């Protein structure tokens, strides 16, 4: 019951978010955000999903990965990517998370060794309702997660990209946001 309820609630939340986002009805509450802190929070939120994986985290030293953004919405975007990586990677597979920044940009990468994305699916993977392969355990969503990620990242003047060497060969998702220069 509980699991089904959570699953349903997530689908309803996603639908409401997509509606708000497509009608332009989302206000970002912007502040100075350190993306490595957001990533740490995302990992925390996905703890249960990540339990069965080898997780590597690499936050490069150097300029602080600061952006002007809404911490709640950025967390939503990164959590979706981390959750997807866990969901589509077998137990014992590896998930590598990294944050790097230079003067202009902050780049977050979520790389997994999971089932990968077929090349024909890559060009449309960020579109809403990309048919998720039906899963017998009922864990499949509506295919809205990545559409939300893209919209949220674009609201922050950023970009998101996906690459994969093909089925069974893992995937990489990369979010690039303009770096906030606090000076
Ligand atoms: N890390 C990943 N590895 C392999 N496939 C992925 C990954 N992330 C997303 N996908 C594919 O993209 C589809 C859409 O993802 P998403 O938009 O998050 O949908 P949902 O909201 O249903 O989880 C998934 O059903 C899956 O087929
Ligand atoms: Mg998903």
Image (spheres, rainbow, N blue to C red):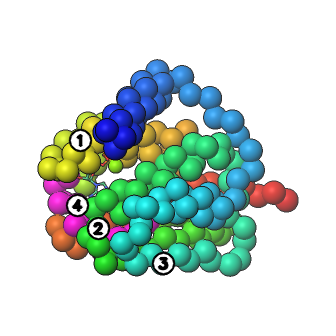
Bounds of the magenta span? Answer: 110-121
Query: Which sits earlier in the primary sequence, circle 1 or circle 3?
Result: 3
Query: Which sits earlier in the primary sequence, circle 1 or circle 2?
Result: 2
Quarter of the image where the C terminus is located = bottom right
Q: Secondary structure at mark 3?
A: strand
Residue 156 at x, y percent in the picture:
58, 43
Query: Which sits earlier in the primary sequence, circle 4 or circle 2?
Result: 2
Q: Which mark is residue 130?
A: 1
Q: Is mark 4 within 8 Å of ligand 1?
A: yes
Q: Nearer the viewer, mark 4 or mark 3?
A: 3
Predominant secondary structure, magenta span:
loop
Q: CA distance from mark 1 to mark 3?
A: 29 Å
Query: Which sits earlier in the primary sequence, circle 4 or circle 3?
Result: 3
Q: Is mark 1 within 8 Å of ligand 1?
A: yes
Q: Residue at x 43, y 32 (%)?
A: 13
Query: Which sits earlier in the primary sequence, circle 2 or circle 3?
Result: 3
**Mark 4 and mark 3 residues within 8 Å of each other at the beta carbon:** no
Q: Residue at x 70, y 53 (%)?
A: 33
Quarter of the image where the N terminus is located = top left
Q: Which residue is mark 3?
A: 56
Confirm whether the magenta stretch covers residue 118.
yes
Q: Is residue 130 above or below residue 88?
A: above
Q: Secondary structure at mark 4?
A: loop
Q: Which mark is residue 89?
A: 2
Q: Which residue is mark 4?
A: 117
């Amino acid at each position: 019951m509980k699991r089904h309820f959570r699953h349903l609630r997530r689908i309803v939340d996603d639908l409401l978010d997509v509606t708000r986002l497509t009608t332009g009805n989302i206000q970002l509450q912007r502040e100075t955000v350190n993306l490595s802190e957001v990533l740490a929070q995302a990992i925390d939120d996905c703890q249960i999903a990540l339990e069965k994986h080898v997780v590597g985290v690499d936050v490069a030293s150097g300029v602080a990965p600061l952006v002007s953004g809404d911490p709640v919405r950025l967390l939503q975007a990164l959590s979706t990517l981390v959750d997807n990586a866990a969901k589509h990677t077998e137990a014992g597979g590896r998930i590598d998370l990294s944050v790097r920044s230079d003067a202009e940009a902050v780049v977050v990468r979520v790389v997994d060794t999971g089932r990968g994305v077929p090349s024909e699916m890559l060009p449309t993977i960020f579109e809403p309702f990309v048919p998720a392969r039906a899963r017998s355990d009922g864990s499949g969503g509506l295919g809205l997660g990545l559409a939300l990620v893209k919209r949220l990242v674009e609201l922050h003047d950023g970009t998101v990209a996906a690459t994969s060497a093909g089925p069974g060969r893992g995937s990489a998702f990369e979010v690039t946001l303009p770096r906030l220069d606090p000076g």
